[in-house]
Image (cartoon, helix red, strand yellow):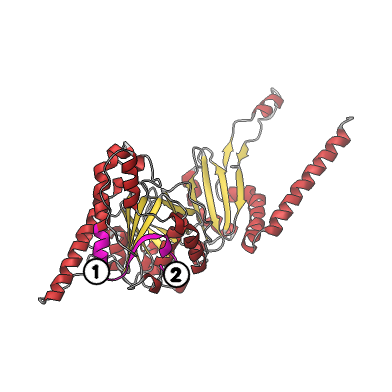
Amino acid sequence: MDYGPDALLLAAVLAGVTLLLVVVRYVRADRGTRTSMRQAVRVRWGWMRLARMAGLTVTDKTPGLLAQIAAQKDGATPAPRVLTPKIKVKPDQFGVIVRARTLPQVGLEEYQKSARFLADAWRCTRVSVLPDGPGKVVIRGVRSDPLTTPTTHRPTGRPLTDLTRWELGVDEYAAKVWVSLANVPGVTVAGAPGAGKTSGVNKFLCDFAPSAAVQIATADGKVSRASEGDYADLVKRMFAFCGDDLDEANALFKRLVDLRKRRSATIREVLGVKNMWHVGPSPEWPLTVLIIDEAHTYFREYKGSDAATKRLAALTAENARLVEDLVKKGRSVGILVILISQKTTGDAIPTFIRDVCPIGLSFAQKTVEAAVAALGEDIRNWPDASPVTLQDPAYVGVAVMAMQGRPGYTRIRTPYVSDTDAARVAEATSHLTADPDLCLDTLLRSTGRTATPAPSLTK
């Protein structure tokens, strides 16, 4: 008892510090997070009653250890206990994340059946329930729709720690969405004009530009010169660029096919592996990204009997063959092709190229046929997730894709990157730009091998 006053004082100090931290966190939070913090308090306080009404409790007729010890031999049987799952609640800008325990007869399926009731009780737009390890579930409740809430991304200018991870944005439950680029030969990006295609690719460029282990080339079919198009601010970070001139594009594609062949011929002796992804990209052997915007410009079929038309037809046919070589054979040597087009139908991107690309994104589309071309026939079975439903201006920047490990299709809000930030990153990282051919020459010389001359192609 002599330490009673000290213990009470210590408890009061700890409670005061905790309350102060909560107040500071509340004051510094944005408006949406403040609302979510109040929502989290209501979720915690009302959980016991809500769980009983939602059928998420279980009655245990076996007395607990203390009840068994305290029970008299001839006394009344202890009353059954009603067990309620324990929860932890975390607020964020869009709503709350509730992590809960399972109980016998109250598992993942029971939580999922109660999701609609929980959404109403918590005043959420939607609620999802996913497994969170053995005996655990994570309940995500969003109060505002992340898909219709525009977001911005300010690049840090620091190199990524994991060059295999491409962060796309957030899904309809505000959970971060990313895809692995390891062993990925190609990506297709489709969508109507102004739907957000180029902005999504700009984020990719700004995130990966600070790494010397990534080198980028671009063919933009919308413009004749870099200064006229969307990549004017980023061209400083590209080792090659061409516009809608088919001869220049053909030369660029040939150059990269030659790089692919040289890498294929030397990878085992230089890197000691037959797949670059076993050791990862490096400044000496960088991940080489080819962006082909408005890809249909370089692949369209020209029909006519005059000499000029025949020549253009031969060029586009060869372009298709060269890009097919990169997509089908460039994966193991670290070459990634990103093809962008309004529609990824067979006349825009040949199917022998499109169908080899394992990652496909589609922003808003006007027809179901365009959605099927971009995402596959199965999108017909998921009409609520179809990019055809994204034509409202509120969905500019929202894409649809099939995610590994998830049923159906995922809708993703991609953030907007301003031209000012893009220019800042390109300027700050321009010194990292290097020709992968020259990098390979240097690497070969360091290992005692003869370096073959690299073709030159100016921007």
Q: What residue type is labelled 2?
A: Val
- The answer to whether 106 is drawn above or below residue 388 in the figure is above
Horizontal placement of 124 versus 408: left or right?
right
Q: Dot 2, crowdedness within 10 Å: few (<14), some or many (≥20)?
A: many
How far apart are the two marked residues, 2 and 1, measured between alpha carbons?
Answer: 31 Å
- Which percent across, then down, holds residue 28? 69, 58
Viewer-proximal residue among 64 and 422:
422
- Which percent across, then down, holds residue 108? 48, 44
Q: Which residue is drawn at 48% across and 48% down?
A: 130
Viewer-proximal residue among 110 and 287:
287
Q: What residue type is labelled 1?
A: Leu
* Residue extending farthest left: 305
Looking at the figure, which quarter contains the N terminus? Answer: top right
2 or 1: tag closer to the N-terminus = 1
Horizontal placement of 229 versus 6: left or right?
left
User: Which residue has dot 1 on it?
Assistant: 246
User: How many numbered callouts?
Assistant: 2
Dividing the picture into quadrants, the one containing residue 304 is bottom left
Q: What stretch is highlighted in magenta?
A: 231-254
Q: Is mark 1 on a helix, strand or loop?
A: helix
Q: What element carries label 2?
A: loop
- Which percent across, then down, holds residue 444? 31, 42
Q: Which residue is drawn at 48% across and 46% down?
A: 161
Disc number at residue 298?
A: none
User: Which residue has dot 2 on it?
Assistant: 396
